Amino acid sequence: MLRNVGRPGTSRFLFPMRTIPEALEPSLRRCASQRRQPTVYLHIPHVRSHTSTSTALSNSQNCWSDRFHTVAGDRRTHRCGDIRLSDVGKEVVLCGWALSPRKIGSDIAFLPIRDASGVAQLVHEMPGAISQADTTLRELLLSLSPETIVCATGLVRKRPVDAVNSDQSTGEVEVLLRSFQVLNPADPLPFSTSARAKPPTEETRLRYRYVDLRRPALQENIRKRSKAAHVVRNFLHNQGFVEVETPYLFKSTPEGAREFLVPTRNKGQFYALPQSPQQYKQVLMSGAVDKYYQIARCFRDEALGADRQPEFTQIDLEMSFVSMEDIMELMEGLVSELWAKVANHKVTIPLQKMSYEEAMKKYGSDKPDTRYDMEILDLTPLLGNVEQGMMVEAFNVKDGARMISNKQADRLKDAIQKEKFPLLGGTIDPRDLSFVRISETGEKDWLMRSKIVGSTPPDALTNINQSLGVQPGDLIVVNRRRAGYLGPHTIVGRARVHVAKTLVSLGKLELAGKLNFLWVHSFPLFSPSETLSTPSGRTAYESTHHPFTAPMSSDLHLLQNDVAAVRGQHYDLVLNGQEIGGGSIRVHDPRLQYYIFSEVLRIPPSKIAQDFGHLLDALRYGCPPHGGIALGFDRLMAIVCDAPSIRDVIAFPKLSGGDLFVDSPSSVAADSLKEYHLKVLDG
């Protein structure tokens, strides 16, 4: 509580001035280890107060009041960003963060203050008969440190025409100051919160995240995220979905990425934080929930990146008695509404659909960016002289020879060669990738100059030129590789992405503002493992997405002898080359699920019972056909907000060093480790 020295009918403001009485100093030292600068109210005569007076306090209480700031200020009547011309003539009470003050001569001082809604301008004008209180108040306003918390009472008035700020929602009005309080003075900031200031390093921003969050860009992102969550909940509620919270304490299962383990006081017993609510939501379908959703927190112990965090959020849903098309249609409605209400952008539906096979053939990626052309052509059938088990692919960068220099082409090739292609044994052979410039007479020998293939029949080259649309000034990217599955992208697929980024950086390709949504479906149900092998030496397979995805009914007969050819009822939602969601129709037959576990994935029976027995039981006792999807909420919001990283749409994200704000992860006491039967090993 602060001491009130003003008389009834007077306004007051806080300013530093008084020392603590000597007689009370020892007792106050005993009560509090750290002293704040004491404060006191002054009064400004002849101005009506809007704060109540208090009774006299004891000397001890008064000194505690001088020592700490404990009042919340007068009751706020308006938010800073809400005052308008319609409020002219009204007396308002505003609270917020003080920005940089300025003055005009010795008579007028301005102080912008900001809260979550926006900025309002306070004005203090020196009267004809200047009092000590007026002088002190002016000095206080001009000496305030940025981000000091203040409360002000004043009269709304219209700004002069030449002072109107059209960039602010409150730019037509200002508040003539009558009463002022400092609620909490701010220490010098580690960096400026101004929209015009250059941001500091990301490490500094995250260490002082509470300051960083005041920046306008982050404020807008966090509020858009909140609005998006509200839109999602309303949309799904209106579609008959039930929001269900699934447990955070799950069990360790071989579902994919590394898990976060949670020890218990039962020796050797651990929980695991869920990588997704996958199994719980399937069990909810067996429990007759029919339509489930939640905005779920998920956890994966993997390397961080611009689009990856150890804890992340997804829009998770599951439905009974549905097909792949049903789920796509529902999600198109959700995406359309989300972009319309949050980003003010119309999404045309239905969205384009493309099979995995077509996406890989045309774009060399299972999440293609279709905002630009450069479609890939398989030259193998046209050449006719490619060795067995190999294939040749190419794409044409129209006018690329004129836009991309030799040096830039060499850098592109180096960047692609540094990428990992595990199913090729690591990186690629430089001799298998070529950037060929088409000169004025170069249409007839460019393939020979690529050194990718030997001599080519003239009619074959003619057909290739026609198919690629080769003309002088073009740049052709050619690659020879092993035929078959390479994972989520091919070599020319990655080359296509790198070329597009280079063209954007050169100002030769405009992608800003374009939104190209795309469904990619019918993925391989299983893919060759990068790490597993079998005693017989045959190829080991793993689930391309997860082991609960149902195969295409027409491919069931291939499960026994041609696992690689089995397509899954899986679908990904792709936007501008980024996967923003993925889902599938699930296996609901317990016998088929057990067959996939045991015969395809080669999981021992004891391990199946231990890790998946609960799920198989749920399928056995009457589980309907069902399917679902999850949208990556963080990544989706980064796109909506046009943010360079998902860290800019998360309130408290992590870097590789952990959470810099609270300095975690951190060590724990030896007693705690002992209680959980844990021991930290050296090395």
Image: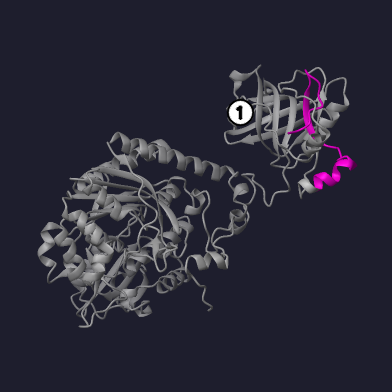
Q: Residue at x 32, y 71 (%)?
A: 478
The location of residue 681, given as percent across then percent down, is 51, 76
Say left or right for 616 vs 167.
left
The location of residue 137, given as percent across then percent down, is 81, 30
- Amino acid type of the residue tagged 1 in the rendering: Thr
- In this orientation, which residue lies closer to the viewer: 490 or 326? 326
In the image, is residue 417 part of the stretch drawn in magenta?
no
What residue is disc 1 on?
170
Q: Residue at x 82, y 44 (%)?
A: 27
Q: Residue at x 26, y 59 (%)?
A: 359
Residue 517's place in the image compared with 68, above or below, is: below
Say left or right for 513 vs 31.
left
- In this orientation, which residue lies closer to the viewer: 40 or 636? 40
Which span of residues is magenta-colored? 1-29
- In this orientation, which residue lies closer to the viewer: 545 or 599? 599
Say left or right for 216 vs 513.
right
Q: Quadrant of residue 388?
A: bottom left
Query: Which of the colour schemes (rainbow, by chain, secondary structure, one colour) is used?
Result: one colour
